[in-house]
Image: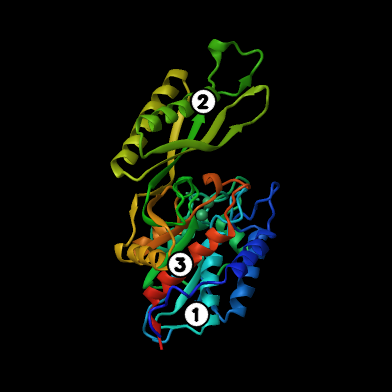
């Protein structure tokens, strides 16, 4: 068979139905999803995905981190697989598409290959990476990080959620701890389809983001130690107020990120006051600063500046300050030949496109350490993500998956 022509398209209705079916599992409170990693809902979502893969004739492998690898055989027994995937886990108040589009889009690509009788030289492996979000167990992209040799398995198994439950224990509990050594698989290439999670494609009126880079990240977990004391009877001059130090640090992070414009962001999404009682000054405050930039020097410079100024703020108030880096990846440059495949596929299919730097982290960032990798992006309404109101159109989903389908076929090589 010749190179796939522009007339070959995936089945957009089947893709959309699958997205809506998966979204019924782990419903949120406002129309989105709460299918956090290694919860019962995660197990239910995995079972549904497996049933669909079984029906598509894929064979399953599961590694010791719980990542699911669903393989469609290739014609050449010696050819390494082309991996295509993303994640089914969500934020606690997540949308229906972040990650899910990438997994179910990959499945739809394979289903379409089956429908069209397309055979490839390389096997194609649809992947559901475990714990991409890092919402329950920091850091994000944990399983792909172990796969790429960035983290050890012991480190990953020991990560704890806010209730003190470990990744290893919860993986056993939901019954998805596989046998495969993590990272033993070799990849010919890796593709990931994802919603943009930002406003650029919609604002520019483009169907497809050709993702050339991903910005780097630091997650800095601060533990501030003050003195628990009565909020009414403790004079202002006698307080050792860890909450006040946190507030000043938050403001300072905003200033540091603003001073690094353009091309940098910084903020805080999670904090815990302890004991978290209205009339007790907090003895301990733990929060995580999330800073990102596509520029390595800027990223590392922001980290150094934040740590220096936080130490000064805490000294002034008399609060103890400890910082632990609980998440990190450097800015990523995706494989030019795969990026070109994505661009050519969009052009061939008549979809408008533009280059993008991913603002969010993705499993593709770690996959890029062990194989040529890249991503395809489609717009999302208002750039909103990590929000239950996250929305995309059926047409955007289908266009992104069409481009994924053609780019993957280009790399996997169609055979007669
Ligand atoms: C992953 O979802 C991230 O935080 O970018
Ligand atoms: Mn995601
Ligand atoms: Mn996400």
351 vs 311: above or below:
below
Give how far apart the Cα atoms at labels 3 and 2 are: 44 Å
Task: Specify the label residue 92 is tagged with.
Answer: none
Q: Residue 212 occupies which quadrant of the picture?
A: bottom left
* Disc 2 target residue: 247
Q: Secondary structure at mark 1?
A: strand
Report whether the residue tagged 2 is closer than 8 Å to ligand 1. no
Whole-percent x, y for residue 396 in the image: 53, 58
Circles 3 and 2 in contact, beta carbons < 8 Å: no
Nearest to N terminus: mark 3 or mark 2: 2
Give how far apart the Cα atoms at labels 1 and 2 are: 52 Å
**Foreground tag (3 vs 1):** 3
Whole-percent x, y for residue 121 in the image: 39, 83
Query: Seen in the image, is 140 located left or right of residue 335?
Result: right
140 vs 291: above or below:
below
Residue closest to the eye, 48 or 112: 112
* Disc 3 target residue: 404
Q: Secondary structure at mark 2?
A: helix
* Disc 1 target residue: 72
Q: Secondary structure at mark 3?
A: helix
Whole-percent x, y for residue 275 in the image: 63, 31
């Amino acid at each position: 068979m010749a190179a796939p022509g522009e007339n070959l398209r995936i089945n957009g209705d089947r893709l959309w139905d699958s997205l809506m079916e998966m979204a019924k599992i782990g419903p949120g409170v406002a129309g989105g999803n709460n299918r956090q990693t290694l919860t019962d809902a995660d197990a239910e979502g995995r079972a549904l995905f497996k049933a669909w893969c079984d029906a598509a004739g894929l064979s399953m492998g599961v590694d010791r981190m719980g990542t699911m690898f669903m393989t469609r055989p290739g014609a050449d027994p010696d050819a390494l697989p082309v991996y295509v995937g993303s994640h089914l886990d969500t934020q606690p108040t997540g949308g229906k598409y972040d990650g899910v589009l990438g997994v179910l889009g990959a499945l739809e690509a394979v289903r379409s290959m089956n429908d069209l009788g397309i055979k490839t030289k390389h096997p194609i492996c649809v992947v559901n990476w475990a714990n991409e979000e890092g919402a329950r167990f920091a850091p994000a992209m944990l399983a792909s990080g172990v796969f790429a040799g960035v983290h050890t398995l012991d480190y990953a198994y020991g990560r704890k959620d806010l209730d003190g439950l470990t990744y290893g224990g919860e993986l056993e509990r939901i019954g998805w701890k596989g046998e495969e050594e993590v990272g033993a698989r070799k990849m010919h290439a890796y593709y990931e389809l994802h919603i943009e999670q930002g406003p650029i494609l919609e604002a520019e009126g483009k169907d497809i983001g050709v993702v050339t880079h991903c910005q780097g990240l630091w997650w800095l977990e601060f533990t501030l130690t003050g003195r628990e004391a009565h909020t009414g009877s403790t004079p202002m001059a006698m307080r050792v107020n860890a909450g006040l130090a946190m507030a000043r640090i938050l403001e300072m992070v905003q200033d540091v990120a603003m001073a690094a414009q353009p091309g940098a962001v910084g903020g805080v999404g999670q904090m815990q006051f302890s004991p978290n009682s209205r009339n007790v000054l907090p003895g301990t405050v733990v929060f995580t600063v999330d800073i990102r930039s596509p520029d390595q020097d800027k990223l590392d410079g922001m980290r150094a500046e934040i740590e220096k100024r936080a130490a000064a703020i805490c000294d002034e108030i008399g609060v103890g300050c400890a910082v632990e880096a609980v998440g990190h990846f450097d800015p990523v440059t995706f494989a030019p030949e795969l990026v070109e495949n994505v661009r050519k596929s969009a052009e061939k299919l008549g979809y408008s496109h533009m280059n993008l730097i991913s603002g969010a982290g993705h499993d593709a960032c770690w996959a890029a350490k062990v194989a040529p990798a890249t991503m395809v992006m489609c717009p999302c309404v208002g750039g909103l993500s990590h929000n239950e109101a996250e929305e995309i159109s059926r047409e955007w989903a289908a266009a992104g998956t069409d481009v994924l389908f053609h780019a993957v076929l280009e790399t996997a090589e169609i055979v007669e």
